[in-house]
Image: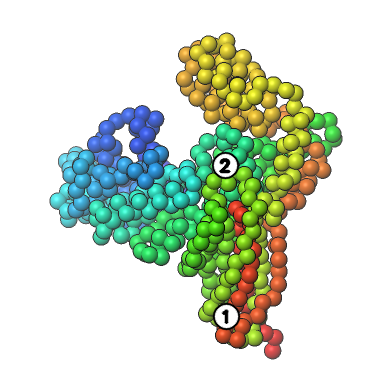
Amino acid sequence: MAGHVIDRYGEESLTFTWSVFNEPDLGAFFWRASWDELQTFYDYTTDAILRAFEDRGYDSSKVFVGGLELGGIFGTNLRLSEFLAHCSPTAEAKGALSKNAAFADKRLDGKRSRRVEELCRASGGKGAPCNFVSVHAYNDAKVMAAKLARAKELALELDAEYFADLWVNSHEACPEWSLPPDEAAADSYLGNGYFPTWCTEVVSRQLAQAEKDPRYAFGETLLTVWRPPADLSGVNAVTRILNRDDNSDGRADRTVTVPYPTFHVLNLLSDLGDEYWPLPRTTVAGHVVTGFASRDERGTIRVALFAHHSEDTQSRSDAEFEIELELSEVGLKRGDQAELTEYRFDRVHNSYFAKACELRQRQSVATPAGEAPEAVVKRLSSTDATEQLAALAEIEKRTPAEQFAVLSSVAALAESASDERVRESAKKMVARLIFAANDNHPGLPKADVDEIERLSKLQKTNVAKVAVTIDGKLSLKPRVSGNGMNMLVIRPLVKER
C-alpha cells in the first residue's frame, strides 16, 4: 500500500503524514485485538512503510510516521504510556512490549528497513520510529489544549531525549464530533463568532504552553469537516451550500457555495510568520480576552485578538472590549507611519448570522406542524419496529435542518435496530442526508441567497494610518466583541523621496 502511494506521488510522499490506527482506545469500535497486538501491528506497519521508501531509493529518516489517533474521550486521561514507552529505546512502562516485533522477527533479517534496524540494534532490540502522536479533540478549547499538552508531558516524562521533538497533533478537532443535537450547538457553526474564536483560543493556549517550554512547540491541528451542509444547518464544516430558487417556484434551480467565517479566519491566520508572541490573558465575565502576534520578513505585523466564552455557544453576550495594545520594537522611527487594516469577526461583522436566523425563523413558521424533535427521537429508541418506522416517516416531512438535528439518532438506529426494515430505512436516510446530492431540495429565494453570498465575502472593517509615538512604539485601541475576533494587519508605509 505504501509503495503504491510512493510510486504515484514520488518524492512528494516524503512530505506526507503517515499515520497508523484510528481511535484504538475506543475498544471494539475500531480495534478488537489486545494492546500488545496493537504495539506489534505498529512495529510491522511502520517498518513496512519505511522499507517501501528505501526500496525506491528514498531516505527513510525523512519519513514522518506515527499515529494512534486516540479518541481521547476521557479528557486528559490518555492511553499513551505503554505505546510511547514501547516506541522509546530506553523507557519502560506497564503494558509496554520490551522489544520491537519487526526487529525480533528473524524472517525479516535482511528485509527490514534500515531506520528500524539502526534504532533497535543500538538499543538491544527496543524502540520504534515515532515522529508524532495524534489525539482527537472534540471539546471546549481549554480541554482540547490540555489534552494535547498532556500527551507531550507524558512523552517527556518517559523519555525526554527521544521525545523532545515529538509532535502532538490533532487530526480531528472541532467543538463537537457529530452533527449538532440542538439549536445552540448548531448556531456555533452558523457564523455567530463562536467557531472562529474557539480556533484562536486553542492556538493561544498552545502558544502559551510553548512559550514556557519550547519542547511543546511541535504539532498541528486539522478541523473535522463534514459534507458541506445544505442551506442553514449548523454542521462542523468550512463552507455551506445554498439551494437557490431563481424562478420563485419554491424549488432549487442551482446551488451556491459560500464560506463560513472560519474559512476566512484560518486563511488570515495562515499569513502569520513563523515566530509568535503570545499576549497577556485576562478573563472578564467568563470571556477569555487575549491574542497573539507575529511579524514577517517584510516587517508586516499581524495581531490576532479575540474574546472567547466557551459556554456561550449562541453568542448571546453583548459584551464588547476595548483593548489597549502597545507594540514596541516595530522597526519604525518616531514620526513614521503604518497602515492598519482590521478584519473583525463576530455575529455582526463578516457574518451572515443575522440573515440566517431570519430565514430560519421564516422557514419554521412556514413548515407544517409536526412532532417535536425530542418526541421523534424518543420514538426512534422504541423497541417496536412500527413505532420506529413511523418516526422515520415523520422525520422525512421535516426541514433539512431538523433532519440533520436528529441524524445521530438515526445513524444509531441504522446500526442497532433488530428489524431489517428499520435498519434499511435508517441507512437510506443517513446516506441521503450525508452523501446524496442536493437535488430536488426546496430553494431559498434568490434575493436572500444573494444577500448571504454578499455577507459571506471577506470585508475589511477598518483601514487607517497610525503613527509611531515619540518612544518608538505603536499604541492602538482595537475592539472585539464577546465571541469575536479582530485580526490587525500593520504594514509600514515607505516614505516617498
The answer to whether the residue labelled 2 contacts the one labelled 1, judged by CB atoms less than 8 Å apart, is no
Look at label 2 and name its amino acid: Asn
Going by the image, does 109 lie left or right of 232?
left
First reached walking from the N terminus: tag 2 or tag 1: 2
**Direction front: furthest residue:** 285
In front: 271, or 368?
Answer: 368
Cα–Cα gap, marks 2 and 1: 41 Å
- Quick check: can you spot residue 2? no
Q: Where is residue 103 in the image (x, y as percent from the top left)?
A: 20, 45
Going by the image, does 201 lie left or right of 111?
right
- Quick check: can you spot residue 208? yes
How many numbered tags mark residues here? 2
In front: 53, or 422?
Answer: 422
- The image shows residue 227, relative to residue 195, as above or below, that is above
Q: In which quarter of the image is residue 118?
A: bottom left
Q: In which quarter of the image is residue 427?
A: top right
Residue drawn at (62%, 81%) of the image: 468
Labelled disc at residue 236: 2
Q: Mark 1 points at which residue?
A: 473
At numbered mark 1, what does the secondary structure look like: helix, strand or loop?
loop
Q: Quadrant of the C terminus?
A: bottom right
Q: Quadrant of the N terminus?
A: top left
Q: Position of residue 164 (x, y in %)?
A: 30, 60
**Direction left: furthest residue:** 124
At numbered mark 2, what does the secondary structure look like: helix, strand or loop?
loop
Look at label 1 and name its amino acid: Lys
Q: Which of marks 2 and 1 is in front?
A: 1
Q: Position of residue 411 (x, y in %)?
A: 52, 26
Q: Quadrant of residue 366?
A: top right
In front: 21, or 214?
Answer: 214
